[in-house]
Amino acid sequence: MLMIEMEDVYKKYPNGVVAVNGIDVKIKAGEFVYVVGPSGAGKSTFIKMMYREEKPTSGTIMINGVNLGKLKANKVPLLRRNIGVVFQDFKLLPNLTVYENVAFALEVTEENPKYIKKQVMETLDLVNLKHKARMLPTELSGGEQQRVSIARSIVTSPKVVIADEPTGNLDPETSWEIMDIFDEINTRGTTVVMATHNKEIVNTIKHRVIAIDGGKIVRDQQRGDYGYES
Amino acid sequence: MKARTLNRHLRESLKSLARNGWMTFASASAVTVTLILVGVFFVIMMNLNKVATDLEEQVEIRVHIDLAATQEDQAALKKQIEQMPEIKSIRFSPKEEELENLIDSFGEEGEAYKLFEQDNPLNDVFVIKTKNPGDTAKVAKKIEKMDYAAKVKYGQGKVEKLFSFINMSRNVGLVLIVGLLFTAMFLISNTIKITIVARKREIEIMRLVGATNSFIRWPFFLEGLWLGLLGAIVPIVLISTSYYYAYDFLEPKLSGNFIEILHFSPFIYQVSGLLILMGAIIGIWGSLMSIRKFLKV
């Protein structure tokens, strides 16, 4: 089953920059995909179009059977509930505790409080942060904050998790811990798409690699390697 | 929306008021200042209007009937006047009554005029009121042309000036109130915008995890409402107390002149209601305006 399908996708920003210049890609459910490429290659735009932060100028994007081009603005929140997103800068709310930050993703869907509690605690257990549920993000290390952010992205049991350089701000040791969690999520059947600059990770934990340069896919190989000198 | 969710929004809106302490104070103060201005202005406007209406009520047209007119001529004139659509009332005042009024108006010295009771030189008079006092001059001119209307008096000159003054002050007041309200809305939307730039992140994250726009708006809507209501407290207290004393002070001075200012009740309750409503609208509008640009998908 196809989870993500892009056909002939172009993206030109209002300032004239062509960030994505004709991309065709198919990602099956349950795959783990690295997206690599130099800065400014169009990686971020490619990723952003998947959760409809950006709309393509032309071409079609299907996510889990939904055509994003035809998706009405008021249906976007429903799409986002099926996609977990993780960022380099964690994007946690500093005033909320770890527990509240994770529960936030379920509160917006008006879930039953009992279900929220159970689901949040289970997810925090998965990322090994159950014992820090009452702490504020500022009291945690970078790696721990990223684990909270991952917990928030998967607490809704999404079909896809999209990560934009999740290890970009972390030291190598912590990066491996984060990768373990993504592997665990993937093993449970969730599709993972990860943009990264971390050569070592890509070359060690082998998965499909999509290399983007100049807004085009220049390489797409199963169990590939990073391939750039960085 | 579920009750639980509303409960969450209520909690969140109150939390954020407390969290943004100084900004809450600044926004509520902006509402307060505006509402005091609008409120004071409104109270003055309404009272001016009341006085103007009282004055207008006193404007009447006096038609002096030609001495040569017979009973039939008088009846015909009366009928003719009554047919005009602008007329509210017409009263016949015979010359004996006119003389009595004249003597009364001179007080002590009026005694001298009592001699005229033998041979009354005055005219019989029709006293006319128009439905809309603004028509007075127009109606008077028409009556002037009728047969047996010897003289038509309505305080020519003075009445026109009074009416144009009243009209002008009404319009100016309205423009000022509308202008003040707009200023307030922009002031508040700007103040709230400062708090929201800090909360841009929160909105961004809410959108990422799939919150609908209305879900995001609710806490801000409520927060604006609280700000507006908080801001309305001081103006209401201030205006009611000062009106209470102003009424006590002014009322005895005016009572001799057929002029009255508005009674404390129900006027001040209406003003308070209006201030609460305006505070709420300004607060909500300002708050929703300031998050608008963060909600574009």
Image (tube, coloured by chain):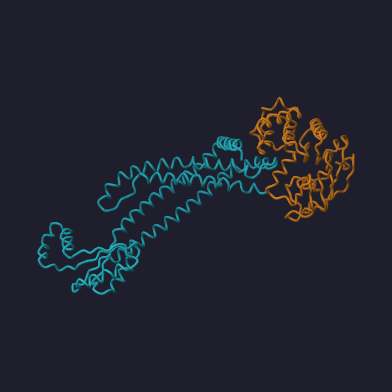
Q: Splitting the image into 4 quarters, where does residue B60 fall?
A: bottom left
Residue visible at 67% across and 28% down? Answer: A135
**Nearer the observer, B94 or B280:** B94
Where is B147 relative to B46, above or below? below
* Residue A26 x, y percent position in the rendering: 84, 46
Q: Is residue A111 visible?
A: yes
Q: Splitting the image into 4 quarters, where does residue B244 fall?
A: top left
In the figure, the orange chain has which letter?
Answer: A
Quarter of the image where the N terminus of chain B is located = top right
Q: Splitting the image into 4 quarters, where does residue A118 fall?
A: top right
* Residue A68 x, y percent position in the rendering: 75, 49
Residue visible at 53% across and 46% down? Answer: B188
Total numbered circles? 0
Compared across the picture, whether B151 is left or right of B197 comes to left
Chain B display color: cyan
Q: Is residue B20 visible?
A: no
* Residue B15 x, y percent position in the rendering: 57, 35
* Residue B16 x, y percent position in the rendering: 58, 37
Compared across the picture, whether A204 is left or right of B65 comes to right
Where is A105 relative to A129, above or below? below
